[in-house]
Amino acid sequence: MKVIVVGAGVVGTMHAWHAVERGHEVVHIEREAEARGASLRNFGQIWVSGRAAGEELDTALRARELWEGIGARVPGLGFRAIGSLTPVRNELELAVAEAAVARPDAAARGYKLLTADEARAVNPALRGTFEAALWCERDAAVEPRLAQLALREALLATGKYTFLPNREVRDVVGEHSVRDDHGDVHTGDAVVLCTGAALSGLVREVAGEIPVRRVRLQMMQTEPLGERLTTSVADADSFRYYPAYASPALDALNDGQAQDPTAAAHKMQLLMVQRLDGGLTIGDTHEYEHPFAFDTLEDPHEHLTRVVESFLGRPLPKIRRRWAGVYAQCVDTSRVVHRQRVRDGVWLVTGPGGRGMTCSPAIAETTANELGW
């Protein structure tokens, strides 16, 4: 079988990976020299913690298993089974963490409530003031700016994979074929369009208006911290954002503790991961209304800096870079991904939202299973 994959972000690359793993030939087409969208502009977190029970959590757990296996074979993508800590500072936040630990699926997520001293034993860099912390053992991390490149190198080594950069697919031609902007037609037994946040043009032509929206975020990265941050770190605002934490305790938190005005205005949470070079990736914001701003704003970065410094008990290293990104998210956020047959033999897979890096191996595996690869 020959599979044509359009889009070299993490979702497209994982579709190529599963096709090659099953013995098929892959032609992988990317409109730029390499992917430059949300697949690179994220934390690189394999984030099980806050996933909704059911399909979303099942997908994340399966993806976590797949990432670990792939990471053992492709060290260059930087897989680390580091877990995460969410420090809490008062009784309202602690009650949400306690409710999470009491969930029926807490063991599957690797939840455990730690005292402040126990949390510092796990992550000694957290020298600031907090009362306790929610530990999630199943969370992990990869290097988002390296993962696709490392996977592609491994795919090229198989002899079953061809990468065609700087080609934008413009048309779906009949069954199983696409035409790029060089005028070349690529034909296979199956075509998978993994277009990320590009929802107009080709996607609108072949699928019409789909129930997927675009979301913009802001993030930043520091110079090296000078010590190890042994886990990912979140703050209690993540309780407000992720569906796993819904509970009467969360309702009480929302009623009794107003979110910081900057965090509320920008729909923020703290997520933080240390990169292999020692720098910290820190974010993020959420913007849903079009048209998106074209600039980045300082208030969210200043808020995140204050929160991080309060957990670390020390000044943040110099900011090395800031960026904005846009990802595609199903309007019904309970859906893991939008998967649609748009022509005979041609499938569109998009809209994983902020779950793309986490869930892409399992999303691609499901596509491969459903298409009978």
Image (tube, rainbow, N blue to C red):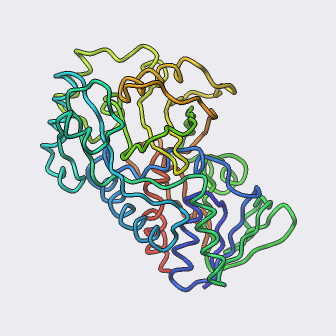
Question: Could you tell me how many numbered marks the image carries?
Answer: 0
* Quarter placement of the N terminus: bottom right
Position of residue 291 measured from the top left corner of the image (x, y, whole percent): 65, 27
Position of residue 317 measured from the top left corner of the image (x, y, whole percent): 53, 30
Which image quarter: residue 20?
A: bottom right
Q: Is residue 38 placed above or below 74 in the rendered structure?
A: above
Position of residue 279 measured from the top left corner of the image (x, y, whole percent): 53, 41
Taking the image as shown, residue 114 lies to the left or right of residue 70, namely left
Nearer-the-camera pick, 139 or 11: 139
Q: Is residue 239 placed above or below 366 in the rendered structure?
A: above
Nearer-the-camera pick, 365 or 176: 365
Position of residue 163 measured from the top left corner of the image (x, y, whole percent): 72, 71
Identity of the residue furthest to the front in this view: 226
Which image quarter: residue 320?
A: top right
Identify the residue at image location x=53%, y=24%.
Answer: 301
Taking the image as shown, residue 306 lies to the left or right of residue 5, namely left
Identify the residue at image location x=60%, y=74%.
Answer: 154
